[in-house]
Image (cartoon, rainbow, N blue to C red):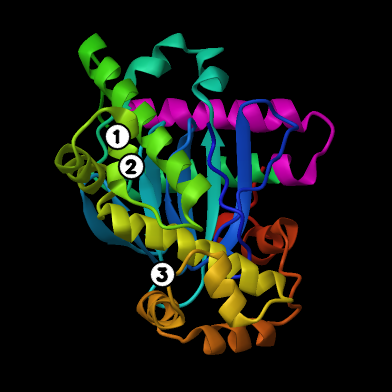
Amino acid sequence: MVRNVMTHSNQMEIIQHLQIPGVKLFFETLEYWEVHIHMELELLWIVDGELTVCSRGGEWLAKQDSILLFHSMEPHEFHSRKGACTVLCIQMLPSFLAHVFSTVRQISFDVPREIPFGEEQGKQFRNKLIQAADWYLHKRLGHELGCSGLLYLAVQQLLTDIPWHIQTKNEMSEQKRRSERLERLMEYVEQNYMHRIRLSDFAQQEGLSVGYLSHFVKKNLQQSFQEYVDSVRFQKACRLIELGGLRLLDVSEESGFSDYRYFSRAFVRRTGKTPEEYRMDLEKQPGYPEHMNELALYARYFGDGYGGESLV
């Protein structure tokens, strides 16, 4: 199951592109992306700004030009403390890569945080991503071949330039069990966030103790169950505010917050703004409710190539 984060103004929306099976590529500006998992291997290049990343049992600041890698079904969350951040995100299903390299399903890259490229390696890798984006977004004749070939080359460079290992059968089996349980938990929250929701109900559904599941959530999502529920409710509230047409009190109720004061504190904690200030700032954004599309973002940052160099 792919979890799509349907938000616009300052969170990320995963845009469904279908022209290349197994590949999603999108250029976006965001401030927050709730904790999520998906089947694809993900490459995230921070083109402008910086992001706080929560994943792999920790939290760190990824600065401009960093490239992050997340494995299939690996939980991760982003938020920016200094305004909007622009990213180029590429997601590739294992089946897309396995067409040419079947062993990829067993590979785990040993990357603790951002990819540790040297200066020249990083430049070569970024140019591959830019050229892939150029093919993908402009849809010129043969763009499927051009984009796919560059992504295969990018993954081949990862195998050459950074450490990795082949997972054992036990490791893969344990990862599968963990991922499936996380999927079920996230789906449970997605279906019930607007009501009173308790970890004990999900524990009963799973046939596990509340204590075990509480530890499981904390270990895999780097937050408590209640904190995760609150993050989902916050994301839903942002989306409702952006769509307009509802009073903030109605937004609070429909997104599952127990009372308006709790709703307001959630916004102040995550954005530094009250819901009223958040909506006012949103309405002041140029072109609201429409925002800069992917081609415009691509032209802004890479219209003349990467670092002023030609892409060909």
Q: Are marks 3 and 2 in contact (CB under 8 Å)?
A: no
User: Which x, y percent locates residue 281?
Assistant: 59, 86
Q: Earlier in the sequence, mark 1 or mark 3?
A: 3
Q: CA distance from mark 3 to mark 2?
A: 33 Å
Can residue 120 be seen in this snapshot? no
Q: Are marks 1 and 3 in contact (CB under 8 Å)?
A: no
User: Which x, y percent locates residue 80?
Assistant: 41, 69
User: Residue under circle 3?
Assistant: 80
User: Which x, y percent locates residue 78?
Assistant: 40, 58
Judged from the image, the secondary structure of the residue bearing numbered disc 3 is: loop
Q: Are marks 2 and 1 in contact (CB under 8 Å)?
A: yes
Q: Earlier in the sequence, mark 3 or mark 2?
A: 3
**Amino acid type, label 1:** Gln
Q: Residue at x 67, y 58 (%)?
A: 298
Judged from the image, the secondary structure of the residue bearing numbered disc 1 is: helix
Q: Nearer the viewer, residue 46 or 17?
A: 17
Q: Residue at x 52, y 83 (%)?
A: 275
Q: Residue at x 46, y 10 (%)?
A: 102
Magenta span covers which residues?
135-161
**Amino acid type, label 2:** Asp
**Amino acid type, label 3:** Ser
The quadrant where residue 301 appears = bottom right
User: Residue under circle 2?
Assistant: 201
Q: Nearer the viewer, residue 24 or 119?
A: 24
User: Residue under circle 1?
Assistant: 204
